[in-house]
């Protein structure tokens, strides 16, 4: 299959991806088409950006690449960041959006069709759930949530309210990586019994041993903490660095793990894992961060094993000479994929040919466009909330095994750990009053 015909085939595969490689999805219980719509085929889509940090601004400007979209409001607890985002929209479109510190004022508005949630992880669940309940569709950054329980509540809210919810893992929308997934599924690699995911990221830096201090001007820090524990302000726990503290996120296991595990689970059409083991710790950084800078997790699936490895501030590259990737080890060949390409290396004597593919495609824009198109068609998007919940759950299980200090035997149907009270306690984190996690 060559040229345009091949690309059309791969794009059609992306459109159907919401029905494949999803683990826990039930075809009988999950509709492909959601009936309730907020926009007509020719209406402009009006959205609000909740969270305007680096990722939030990037997503927001990706939405504005499309002429049928308007950003009518930006929302952040940091007035400085929010003003920067508002100016970016004004420069791009000639009209300044409203600036709102409390996301609930966004949810209340009747003139907004969708929200983009790009907050720290511990603030993904509530804006998404409230937006679904208010009849809005949601584009939510990865990982879906801070815990498995939050993810389940988000999925329930989306389904109960017939909302389109897309998780922001843009590689799932890459036609080039769809070709790699199709190659894995073709059987050409032979039997695949080992899959390796890795992130050895030289650009991740320690925040150091920062001290508590005064809250920066224009920041509502208590609102930033939200459902997390009350504590003094510390710049080493704020903005980008929130990723390395259990109250707000799950470290590289969930930050980059969701990206790469997503590709592995997609290509392998994986069901829920049966067992998970994990080891790791603070072996590189001497600072106040909590999540492991070095971690290995091993997952047992019914027909193959999968490993995850990461190290922050790693010297040099990881496996296969790359900082990140997924390797599928088959009996006939191995396939390695990364963010913008993939290659096949046949074993000696194989009839397969070596091949390598790279791309400069804008998969983030393709991913956002898929979300916007699904808002109109009401079809489930490529990274539908149920897919996002499954993938995020697999990443969270690596941390549950690490934090509980035991092997995890996972009951995917009931989303419980068999015989491990410590791990089960971590499935849903407690919320600080007055915040409360709805069931959906």
Image (spheres, helix red, strand yellow):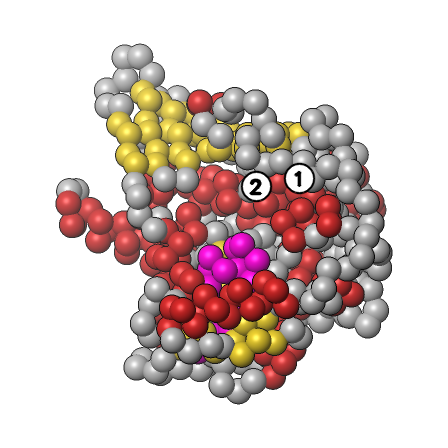
Q: Residue furthest top?
A: 348
Q: Is residue 289 left or right of residue 305?
A: right
Q: Is residue 311 left or right of residue 110?
A: right
Q: What is the x, y in percent for residue 404?
A: 79, 39
Q: Which residues are magenta?
A: 46-60
Q: Residue furthest bottom?
A: 110
| 61 relative to 279, above or below | below
Whether the magenta-drawn stretch holds residue 56 is answered as yes
SS type, badge 2: helix
Residue occupied by mark 2: 257
Q: Quadrant of residue 268?
A: top left
SS type, badge 1: helix
Residue occupied by mark 1: 398
- Who's the residue at 49% across and 30% down the image? 323
Whether the magenta-drawn stretch holds residue 104 is answered as no
Asked if the residues shown at circle 1 and circle 2 are in contact, with their CB atoms under 8 angstroms apart, the answer is yes
- Who's the residue at 73% across and 50% down the image? 235
Which mark is first along the chain, 2 or 1?
2
Q: What is the x, y in percent for residue 61?
A: 42, 62
Q: Nearer the viewer, mark 1 or mark 2?
A: 2
Q: Residues within 10 Å of mark 1 (few under 14, many from 20)?
A: many
Q: What is the x, y in percent for residue 155?
A: 59, 65
| 278 relative to 94, above or below | above
- Who's the residue at 82% across and 72% down the image? 434
């Amino acid at each position: 299959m060559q040229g345009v015909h091949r690309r059309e085939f791969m794009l059609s595969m992306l459109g159907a991806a919401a029905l494949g490689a999803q683990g826990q999805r039930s075809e009988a219980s999950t509709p492909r088409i959601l009936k309730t719509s907020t926009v007509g085929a020719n209406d402009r889509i009006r959205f609000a950006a909740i969270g305007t940090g680096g990722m939030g601004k990037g997503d927001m400007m990706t939405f504005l690449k499309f002429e049928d979209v308007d950003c009518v409001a930006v929302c952040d607890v940091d007035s400085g960041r929010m003003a920067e985002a508002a100016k970016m929209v004004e420069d791009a479109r000639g009209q300044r959006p409203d600036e709102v510190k409390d996301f609930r004022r966004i949810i209340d508005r009747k003139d907004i069709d969708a929200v983009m949630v790009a907050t720290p992880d511990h603030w993904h669940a509530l804006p998404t759930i409230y937006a679904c309940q208010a009849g809005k569709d949601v584009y939510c950054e990865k990982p879906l949530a801070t815990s498995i329980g939050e993810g389940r509540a988000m999925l329930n809210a989306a389904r109960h309210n017939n909302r389109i919810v897309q998780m922001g893992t843009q590689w799932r929308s890459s036609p080039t990586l769809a070709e790699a997934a199709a190659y894995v599924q073709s059987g050409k690699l032979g039997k695949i019994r080992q899959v390796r995911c890795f992130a050895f990221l030289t650009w991740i830096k320690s925040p150091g041993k920062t001290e508590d201090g005064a809250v920066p001007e224009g920041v509502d820090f208590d609102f930033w903490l939200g459902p997390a524990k009350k504590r003094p302000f510390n710049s080493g726990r704020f903005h980008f660095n929130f990723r390395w503290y259990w109250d707000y996120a799950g470290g590289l296991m969930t930050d980059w793990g969701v990206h790469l595990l997503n590709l592995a689970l997609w290509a392998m059409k994986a069901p829920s894992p049966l067992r998970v083991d994990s080891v790791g710790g603070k072996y590189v950084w001497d600072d106040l961060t909590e999540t492991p800078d070095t971690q290995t997790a091993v997952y047992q699936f019914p027909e193959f094993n999968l490993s995850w490895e990461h190290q922050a501030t790693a010297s040099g590259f990881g496996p296969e000479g790359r900082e990140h990737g997924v390797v599928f080890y088959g009996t006939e060949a191995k396939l390695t994929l990364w963010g913008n390409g993939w290659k096949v290396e046949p074993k000696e004597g194989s009839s397969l040919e070596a091949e390598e593919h790279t791309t400069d495609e804008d998969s983030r824009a393709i991913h956002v466009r898929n979300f916007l198109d699904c808002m109109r068609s009401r079809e489930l998007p490529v990274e539908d909330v149920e897919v996002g919940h499954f993938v995020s759950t697999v990443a969270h299980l690596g941390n549950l095994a690490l934090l509980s200090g035991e092997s995890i035997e996972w009951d995917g149907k009931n989303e419980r750990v068999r015989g491990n009270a410590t791990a089960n306690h971590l499935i849903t984190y407690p919320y600080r009053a007055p915040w409360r996690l709805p069931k959906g």
